[in-house]
Image (cartoon, grey):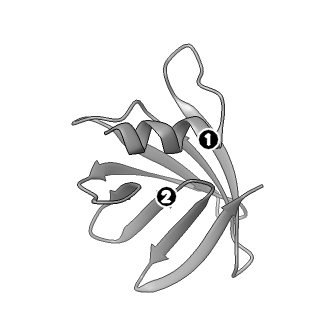
């Protein structure tokens, strides 16, 4: 839990609602805006993929390293200022801008 909090502290300031926001640029050119809720059993991330006009909300899932958010179709796994985005079985590496 401390590692997740440390990762979230590195990627952006917290708002009054304890949400943290970060912008990522991925190796495949994808731009992603992530808004993280407070970590914990009901933690989640809301991802907005630029140009797609869609927002995805992924629940926080167990992770031995970093913060992992996933459902049956998508995974967003952060560690420090980097992330790995997997959609439809295709993975791209992302970094905060």
| Dot 1 alpha-carbon crowd within 10 angstroms: few under 14, some 14 to 19, many 20 or more | some
Front-lying residue, 88 or 95: 95
Front-lying residue, 55 or 96: 96
The label nearer to you, 1 versus 2, is 1
Q: Residue at x 49, y 39 (%)?
A: 6
Q: Are marks 1 and 2 in contact (CB under 8 Å)?
A: no
- Real-space Cα distance between discs 1 and 2? 11 Å
87 vs 77: above or below: below
Which x, y percent locates residue 10? Answer: 61, 41
Q: Which mark is residue 10?
A: 1
Q: Residue at x 51, y 70 (%)?
A: 85
Q: Is residue 31 left or right of residue 69?
A: right
Q: Secondary structure at mark 1?
A: helix
For marks 1 and 2 on the same chain, the one whose residue lies earlier in the sequence: 1
The quadrant the N terminus occupies is: top left
Which x, y percent locates residue 92? Answer: 57, 79
Q: Which mark is residue 78?
A: 2
62 vs 85: above or below: above
Q: Residue at x 49, y 58 (%)?
A: 78
76 vs 47: above or below: below
Q: Is residue 8 left or right of residue 39?
A: right
Q: Secondary structure at mark 2?
A: strand
Q: Is residue 16 left or right of residue 33?
A: left
Q: Residue at x 78, y 55 (%)?
A: 97
Outermost residue, bottom direction?
90
């Amino acid at each position: 839990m401390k590692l997740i909090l440390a990762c979230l502290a590195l990627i952006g300031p917290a708002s009054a609602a304890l949400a943290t926001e970060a912008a990522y640029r991925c190796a495949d050119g994808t731009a992603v805006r992530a808004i993280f809720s407070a970590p914990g059993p009901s933690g989640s991330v809301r991802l907005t993929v630029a140009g797609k006009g869609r927002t995805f909300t992924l629940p926080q899932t167990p992770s031995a390293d970093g913060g992992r958010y996933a459902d049956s179709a998508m995974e967003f796994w952060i560690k420090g200022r980097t992330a790995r985005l997997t959609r439809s079985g295709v993975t791209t590496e992302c970094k905060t801008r």
